[in-house]
Image (cartoon, helix red, strand yellow):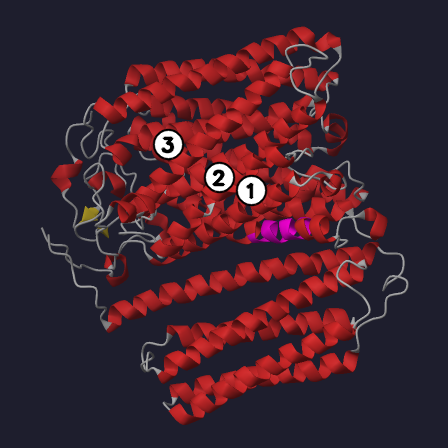
Amino acid sequence: MAVHAFTMSDLEYAEIRSHRLLGFLFFLISDCVIFGDFIFSYLYLRNAAPIWPPVGIERPYLYLAAVNSVVLFGSGATMHFAMEAFRHSNRTRFVGLLLATIVLGSLFLGGQAYEYTHLRDTWAGSTFGASFFTLTGMHGFHVFIGVIFLITVLIQTLRGTYSAHRYFGLTAATLYWHFVDVIWVALFFLFYIY
Amino acid sequence: MSVTNVGHPASSHIHPPPDTFIKKYVFSLDHKVIAVQYFITGGLFFVLAGLLAELMRVQLMGPNNHVLSISTYNQAYSVHGSAMVWLVIIPLLTGGFGNLVMPLQIGARDVAFPWLNMISFWLFPPAGILLFASFLYGAPQAGWTEYPPFSVQASFGTSMWCMAIFLIGVSATITGLNFLVTIVKMRAPGMTWTRTPLFVWATGVTAFLSMIATANLSAALAGLFIQREFGVPFYDVSRGGAPVLWQHVFWFYSHPAVYIMILPAFGIVSEVIPTFVRRPIFGYKAIAYSSATIGLLSFMVWAHHMFTSGLQHWEQFAFMVLTMLIAVPTGIKIFSWVASLWGGKIRLDSPLLFVFGFLSTFTFGGVTGILLASVPVDVHEHASYFVVAHLHYVLFGGSMFGIFAGIYYWWPKMTGRLLDERLGKWHFWSMFVAFNATFLPMHWIGLHGMPRRVATYDPIYTSTNEFVSISAFVLGLSMLLFAYNALRSAKNGEIAGPNPWGGRTLEWMIPSPAPYYNFKEIPIVLSGPYDYGKPLPYANVDQELATVPVH
C-alpha cells in the first residue's frame, strides 16, 4: 500500500503552521486563565482582609521592581525588532537582537532573585506573601522557560533550521515572550502600585 | 491501494502506519486506538467507583451500621464522586467518544496534534492510580468538592487527590486545545459550521470549556496543594486565608464541568435520534447554537452551589436568575429532540432506547435542578439527599445513559461487530428500572430531611434506605449484562458492515472498523448531514459502501 510521502509542500506547511499557531494561542489563553485564577485569589483575599497589607508585612520595594520592569519591557522591544530583522532577512542583526533579548531576560531573573532574597516576608508567611510569591514565582518560571526557549531558537537559527517561510518555533517564542511581558504589566500594577 | 491527496492538504497529513505492537496499541498516535484506550481505562475506573457506591449502600442498609467506619465511609463517597466525575464521565465522553467519532465526522484523518493526544491519554491512568492509591495514605474525606478547612487538615491522601486531579486536569486541558484546533481547522472542504454534525458542535463547545475551566481547576488544585504541603495561606482562615475562596475557584471550574459532562451526551442524543427516527433532526440550528449558549452561560452560574456559603442577597438573586436562564437553551434542545420524533419512522433499537432513558431521566433531573436553583428552596435542601438524587439524575440518568447510547450506537464502528440486540434491551430495562428505583426515593427522604455524606441516619428512613440499597445492587448487576454483551460481541458478534444503522454522517461512509487513515480521499461535503430521504451529500466517498441495506 502506497502512502503519500511525508515531505511537506509549502502549501501543506502553511496549513500545519496555522494549526500550530492556533494551538499555541489556545495554550496561551489557558495559561492566562491560570494566572487569572491566582490574581482573582489575590484580589479576593485582599478584599476580605481588614487591613492591607497584613499587619507587619511591608510591600516589596517599588524602585527595584521598576528597574527590573524596564529591563523586561526592553527585552520585549529587542524581541520585536529581532523578529523584524528576521522578516527582512537581516541575519546578523537578528542574531544580535535575539542575544540581547536573552541577556535582558536573564538580567530580569537575576533582579528577581535579588528581590526574593532581600524580602522579609515569605511564601507561607502571610496572604500577601502567598499571592506575591506564587504569582511572581510563576511568572519568573515563565521567564526562565522563555529564556530556554529563546536559546533553543538561537541554536536552531545557527544550525539553519528556519527558512524564510518556515519558522514556527521563532513565531511561538516571540508570542510567548510578549505574553510573559504582558502578564508582568498586570503583576507589576497589582503588587507594586495598587 | 494508494492514499491520494484531495482538497485539504492538512487533513491529509498523517503519521505513517504503526509497525510495532507498542506503537500500535500502547503509545499509539491513532485517535481511534486512543479512544479505545480511554474506553477500557475509563471502564475499569467505572467498575471501581461503582463498587465504592455499592459499599456505601451496604453501609446504609440500616441505621448505625458498622460495615464501614465513619471516616472510611467519608473516603468512599469522596473517591466515588471524584472518580466518577474525573476518571469516568469526562474521559469517556471527551477522550472516548470525542476521539472515536469527532475526527471521523469532520472527515479528517486524525486530530490536529496526535502527539498531544497520546500524552493526554497517558496522563489519565497515572491520575486514576494516584486517586485510588490515596486509600493507602488516608483517602480524601471532604467529598469530591474538598472544601477547606477539612481538606486542609486531612491526611496525605488529600494531597494525592490534588495531584491526581491536577494530572487529569492537564490532560483535559490539552485534549480541549487539541480538539478545538481540530474542529476549527480540519473540517472537510464544504463542511461549513451549519453543515457540521451536532456531536461535533457539542464536542467543540466541550473542548472550549475544558480548555478554559480546567486550566482554572489546575490552578485551584495547585493552590490547595501548596496550602497543604507548604502552609501557603490561601484557604486557611486562621492565617488570613478564605475557605470560601476555594469554593469560588473550585465551582468556577466545576460548574462548566457539569456541562463538560453533559454536552457530549447531548451530542450523542442528537446523532442517535435522526438515525433511528429516519427523518431530519428538528431545529438543527437551535440545537447547535443552544450548545454554544450553554457553554457561555455555564461560566456565569458557579455560585449557585454556594447559596449557603454567605453570599450577598443580590449575588444570590443574580446567580439564581442566571441559573434558571440555562434551562432555556437546555429546554430548546429537549423540545427539538422530542419534536424530531414526530412523524418519524421510529426503530426502537437499543441506542434509541437509551436515548429515551436519557430524555426522561435527564429532564427529570433538570426540573429538580430548577428547584435547587431557587434560593429559598436550596437553602433548605442544600446538603440533603435531594441533592444526591438530583445530581444522579443528571449525571447517571443524563451522562451515563448518553454514554451507553453512544456505546451501542458506535460499537459497530469501533469493533466492526454488532452488540446483541436482545441483551441490549434487557440491559436497558434492568438499568432503567433499577436506576429509578435507586434514586427516585432519595428525593423523598431528602425532602424529609436526611442529610447527605453521613454514614448513618435516623431510623425512620430505614425502610426507604433498604429499598434504595437493594435497587442499587440490582443496578450494579445490570452492568454485568452489558459486560457479557460486550465480551460476547468482541469475540463472535455479528459482522456489522460499514453502515449498520443507515446513518448519514461521515463516519458511516467508511468501513468498520475504520482503517487507520480513515478516508481514502478527503470527502467533500455538499450539504448538512441529516437530510433523510435525499441523496447522500458527499463527493469523494464510496456511496455504495454507505448504502448497504440497513441492518
Indicate the position of residue B302 as horizontal and vertical percent values. Answer: 65, 43
Q: Is residue B349 visible?
A: no
Region in magenta = B215-224
Work out how far the residue at label 1 is from the one at label 2, CA to CA, in angstroms.
8 Å
Instruction: Give x and y (percent) for residue A10.
Output: 25, 73
Q: Which residue is tagged 1?
A: B257
* Rendered image: mark on residue B406: 3
Q: Is residue B501 above or below residue A22?
A: above
Question: Considering only vertical position in the picture, is B472 above or below B490?
Answer: above
* Subunit of label 3: B
Q: Residue at the far top: name it.
A: B463
Q: How far apart are labels 2 and 3 at the CA level? A: 14 Å
Q: Chain of mark 1?
A: B
Secondary structure category for the residue under label 2: helix
How far separated are the C-alphas under marks 3 and 1? Answer: 20 Å
Q: Residue at x 85, y 56 (%)?
A: A49
Mark nearer the viewer, 2 or 3:
2
Work out whether mark 3 precedes mark 1 in sequence or the reverse, and give the earlier one: 1
Query: Which kind of residue does numbered mark 3 sit on?
Result: Gly
Magenta stretch holds residue B217: yes
Q: Callout 2, which amino acid? A: Ile
As helix, strand or loop, the secondary structure at mark 1 comes to helix
**Residue name at image x 79 percent, y 62 percent:** A128
- Tell me the quadrant of the picture where the C terminus of chain B can be found: top left
Does label 1 lie on the same chain as label 3?
yes
Q: Is residue B328 left or right of residue B447?
A: left
Tell me where residue B229 appears, x and y as whole percent.
70, 50
Could you tell which of marks 1 and 2 lies nearer the N-terminus? 2
Give the chain letter at badge 2: B
